[in-house]
Every structure is written in structure tokens, then in C-alpha cells.
Amino acid sequence: MALTRRQRARTVRGLQYGVLVVVLVVLALVADWETISDRLLNPQIAAEQFPEIIQVALVNTVIYTALGFSFALVLGLLLALMKLSSVAPYRWLANLYIEFFRGVPALLVFIAFGFGLPLAFGVRFGIYMTVMISLGLVGAAYIAETLRAGIQAVPKGQMEAARSLGMSSGRAMISIVIPQAFRIILPPLTNELIALTKDSSLIYLLGLATSEYELTKFGRTAMSDTANLTPLVLAGLCYLIITIPLGFLVRRLESRSAKAR
Amino acid sequence: MTAVTSAISELTPAPVEGEPLVEIRGLRKSFGTHEVLKGIDLVVHPGEVVCIIGPSGSGKSTLLRCVNLLEQPTAGTIRIGAMEVTDPDVDIDLVRRHVGMVFQQFNLFPHLSVLRNCTIAQDKVLGRKGADAERIARSTLARVNLDDKLDAFPAQLSGGQQQRVAIARALSMDPDLMLFDEPTSALDPELVGDVLTVMRRLADEGMTMLVVTHEMAFAREVAHRVVFMDDGMIVEQGPPEQVISAPTEERTREFLRRVLDPTHVEPGESEPY
């Protein structure tokens, strides 16, 4: 007996719900819920993580990210202007930089500055300096591309109007074009901040003093100490405290700029 | 209306005696192989209002944009006051300080308030700070009847208001010469009048103005001289009553027929239906 289209759609949807229910039932029966909740979200171990997980780890993650992002912003702006330069070698250098740092893993950069340079040249950076440089170098490559697109998205008439008022091209760039470019790229720039927040965890492989722990290192250490996953789960949740509001902000900004157009 | 107009013309006779403020000699401009300006000679005297008319693509805007070097001329010389604009060693920012420009698309700075639009160049270019710059901006905004919109942002204004702010922004730099590049072409018809009123007042106050426009009524009433351009050359120039009302060149006549009576059908052309 042939099924009508509506009957067939209903059958397919019924099957999908059926699979879901079966999986959930099997999980509920088979899994040892007591052990899982004990090892994954143990209230007592969770309580022990406070207040350090916030006061030390979360705060340090924010500080490391802010340092890296600030450096990335300055360097990214410089690279974006180099990419738009009329002097060809500047454009080549900027392209070379961007291709390189977008192409290599951030972890490799952290290893280079955390271990490589001290070994090869005997120069040692403090922990803040290492994070700032490593995170900044990688972030700058992405931010440069975003900024260049933003600067080019500002209508040509803005530069012409500023020049017509007697501003030099540098002055017009700083006072007129770049502020508008930043408005245009605020959403992608916030996405970059989210990415850097997560990448700041890479510092964990360097030797850190307890007071320098950021979320991932903190979660990992506490996990080993307690033989329990709870601290790591908490650390993960702390990242979400930072990234989910930022993601929400991006969507707000995007819908606002879509409306303004 | 005609009586009033002629009265204004009598009050502000075309100032022709003395040294010209702008002197353009043999100006040529090519984009690639396409020659847009084919040897322009034009002088503008202080206090004179010169309207440039002509079909689109005739090079009117390019001529205007060469005067403040938004376009680099291919050949020829331009002098404004004592400054050789076309001299390779000229300080172009210094030239532009003395030449105000008003664009078809207004080009206000959208991230700045109306007041800041009118003070930022005073501040960054002339070094005129705070209260001084603000006082001048307020007075130029009053001249364009917008002193009640100081804190508004460009997006909150109508096109006509934006264009008047753009005029005030240029005036805030105390220019010796104002360039208008089709200032009313992007406006809804009902907003054109306010902008033209401001420009007419500016002309009456003795500002030297070079205006590219399609507003024939404005050119007829306000201009001391009308220049008709076609195909990169000046075809005809003279007082408006001559060029607009009694043109001698056939190309001028044909252009004016089209502009003044768009529904006009040339004899021999087929009926539009």
C-alpha cells in the first residue's frame, strides 16, 4: 500500500523520535548514574574549587587574553595599514606575516616563545610577556585581515571629504576612516576575542606558579589532585561565562548593523 | 520673481576687475586612454559665482575635482590666489584649507555629531581648539539654519539638512573659494529648495563659488557667469541671460532644449508611442 506524502513524513519523524527515546532509555538503564555524577559534578569537590577558580584562574584567563588582544590589535592595525600601503614591499611583508601566522598552530608559537627562545638565545620572557607576544602574534594575523576589509568598506567619499578639509591622509585615516572601520568590524573582532580567550589556555604547558594558573591549567591540576573530572568541568563552564555573553554581543551587534543598512 | 532676481543681480554685480582668484590654463585630464578634459581655460574672479552646466560625462565634475587636486591633472596649470596648485612641490593640504568642497553625496562623517563634523577639521588642521572652534561652527550652522541640530547625528537628518551641514562644515574652515559638485542631485525634489536658498545667500554675501549643477533656474538667477561644457571642452560661456536664454552654439541649444523640456521631441524623431 503506497503511503501519501504526509503519511510518509509522519512516519519518518516518528522513527526519529523513536530512536531518540530508545537511546535515552538505554543510557538511563545501562549507565551508572551515581558514579558518573560523582566523578563529573561532585558537589563537594566543586565547592573546594572556590574561590580560587574565580579569583585566580578566571581572572588570569581574562588578563592573559586582554594582554594578547591588546597587542594583537596594535600589531593587526599596523599590518592592515601595511597591506593597504602604496609601497609594495610593505604589502609583501604584511602578506608574508599573515600567511605564516595563520598557517602555523598557535601552540607552536607558544612553544617557540616559552621554550625555544630561552634555549636557543638564552632570552627569557616573563609569563605575561610570553602570553602577550604569543597570543598577540597569532591574533594579529587574523585581526589584520579583518581590519583591512573594514577600512576598505568605509566609503571613498569619507577620505575625500576629510582630505578636502585639509587633513593629511594619515590624519584622515586616524580621525575619520579607522573609527568607522572599527564599527564595521566590531562583530568579527569580538569573534576574534572569543578565539583568543580559548587560545590563552595554551600557556598551560609552560611552567606556571600557582598564582599564575589560568582556567585550563587550574582545572587540570585540580583534576589530578582529586582524581575527579569535576574541576575540569567547572573550568569549562568558566570559559562559557566569558564566551557566551560575547557571542550574544556579536549577534546583537550584527543585527544592529544589519538594521542600520 | 524676475524683478526680485534682477534686483539681487544689481546688488551683487559680477566682480570682473582685478586679479582672478582662480586661473586654469590648458587643463587636461585622462583616465587611462580616455581623455575627459581636453584643454580647459577658465578664470574665476573674487566674489564671482560661476555655474558649470553640461551633459553628464562632459567632464564638469572632473574639472571641479582637479581644482582641489582630488584628481591629479594630466597637463596644464591651476593657480588659486598665490598658490600654484599644479606645482609638484605644492603643499596640497594648505591649498585645500582655502578651498571648501561640497559633494553630491554629502559625505558627512557619520560617526560624529553635527557640531563635531564642523569642528574636527578646525581642530586637527587649523589647531583651533574647543570653544573657539565651537563658536565658529555654531555660527556657520546658523548660516545654514541648522543651529538647532548641533547634537544630532547625520543619519538622523534629511538629505537637505545633511547637505546644509556639509556646507557649514566647509564654511567653518573660512575658505576663499567654494566648490559645489552637483549639490542637489541626490536630494528629493522637495528638499532642493532649502539647499539652494543657502547657496544663494552665500553668493549674495560675496563668496567665490564654482558650482556644477543641473538647476537651470538657480544658474539663471544666481550665477554671474555660466559655463557650458561638452565632451571635455568649454563650448560657450557668458552671463546667464546669454548662455541660458540666448545661446549661440548649437550644442548648447540642444542641451538646454533637453534639460528645460524633457518631453520635447526633435522634429524627425519618431513619436515615443
Image (cartoon, grey):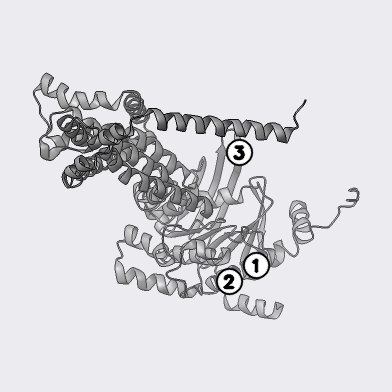
Question: Which of the two discs, 2 and 3, labels the residue nearer the N terminus?
Answer: 3
Disc number lying in front (2 or 3): 2
Instruction: Say which residue appears at 17% left-offset and 29% top-offset.
Output: A224
Residue B38 locus on image (x, y percent): 61, 42
Q: What residue sits right under mark 2 in the picture?
A: B200
How far is mark 3 from mark 1, CA to CA?
30 Å
Nearer the observer, B232 or A96: A96
Q: Quadrant of residue B227?
A: bottom right
| Mark 1: secondary structure | helix
Label 3 resides on the chain identified as B
Mark earlier in primary sequence (1, 2): 2
Above or below, A228 against B9 in this view is above
Residue type for callout 2 = Arg
Q: Are the residues flagged by discs 1 and 2 in contact, CB closer than 8 Å?
A: yes
Q: Is residue A136 visible?
A: no
Say which residue label 3 marks: B35
